């Protein structure tokens, strides 16, 4: 059964003390649907797609391909596709004047 998350959940998900919640959401991403508006999406994208700080000389590891499918061309929405991949293929419905839907089809 899918879990739908909206509103203040996105703010809470990015708080430093919410690590257990992030792990739970990411480990069940295929059953999660996020419905952020423009501001909520920006908060999530900044948190999940910003490069992690590294020590000098360390390399960052990229995640594997997630099999993300977009209802619209991914070239038009690279930030949404990047967030979906970073969040283990979660389904994202970005609410705006024209809604954007990304669905994990794996």
Image: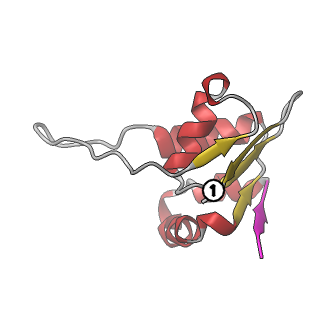
Residue 4 colored magenta? Answer: yes
What residue lies at 12% left-to-right and 37% top-to-bottom? 56
Q: Is residue 14 above or below residue 102?
A: below
x and y, in percent, of residue 34 in the image? 73, 54
Q: Quadrant of residue 54?
A: top left
Q: Is residue 78 above or below residue 88?
A: above
Q: Quadrant of residue 90?
A: bottom right
What number of labels is visible? 1
What residue lies at 26% left-to-right and 43% top-to-bottom? 60
Depth check, front residue: 58 or 75: 75
Q: How is the image coloured?
A: secondary structure
Residue with the most extreme left position: 57
x and y, in percent, of residue 52 in the image? 34, 43
Residue linked to disc 1? 90
Q: Classify residue 86 as left or right of residue 28.
A: left
x and y, in percent, of residue 26 in the image? 54, 64
Depth check, front residue: 65 or 9: 65
Query: What segment carries the magenta color?
Result: 1-6
Quadrant position of the N terminus in the picture? bottom right
Q: Classify residue 11 as left or right of residue 51.
A: right
Residue with the most extreme right position: 97
What residue lies at 50% left-to-right and 46% top-to-bottom? 48
Q: Classify residue 7 as left or right of residue 76.
A: right
The residue carrying pointer 1 sits among few (fewer than 14), some (14 to 19) or many (20 or more) residues within 10 Å by Cα, namely many
What residue lies at 79% left-to-right and 40% top-to-bottom? 37
Residue 18 colored magenta? Answer: no
Q: Classify residue 99 as left or right of residue 88.
A: right
Label 1 element class: loop
x and y, in percent, of residue 62 in the image? 34, 45
Quadrant position of the C terminus in the picture? bottom right
Q: Quadrant of residue 33?
A: bottom right
Residue with the most extreme bottom position: 1
């Amino acid at each position: 059964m899918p879990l739908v998350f909206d509103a203040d959940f996105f703010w809470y998900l990015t708080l430093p003390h919410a690590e257990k919640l992030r792990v739970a959401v990411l480990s069940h991403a295929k059953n999660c649907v996020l419905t952020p508006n423009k501001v909520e999406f920006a908060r999530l994208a900044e948190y999940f797609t910003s490069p992690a700080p590294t020590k000098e000389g360390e390399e960052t590891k990229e995640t594997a391909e997630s099999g993300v499918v977009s209802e619209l061309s991914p070239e038009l929405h690279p930030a949404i596709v990047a967030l979906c991949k970073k969040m283990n293929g979660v389904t994202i419905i970005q609410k705006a004047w024209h809604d954007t839907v990304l669905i994990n089809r794996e």
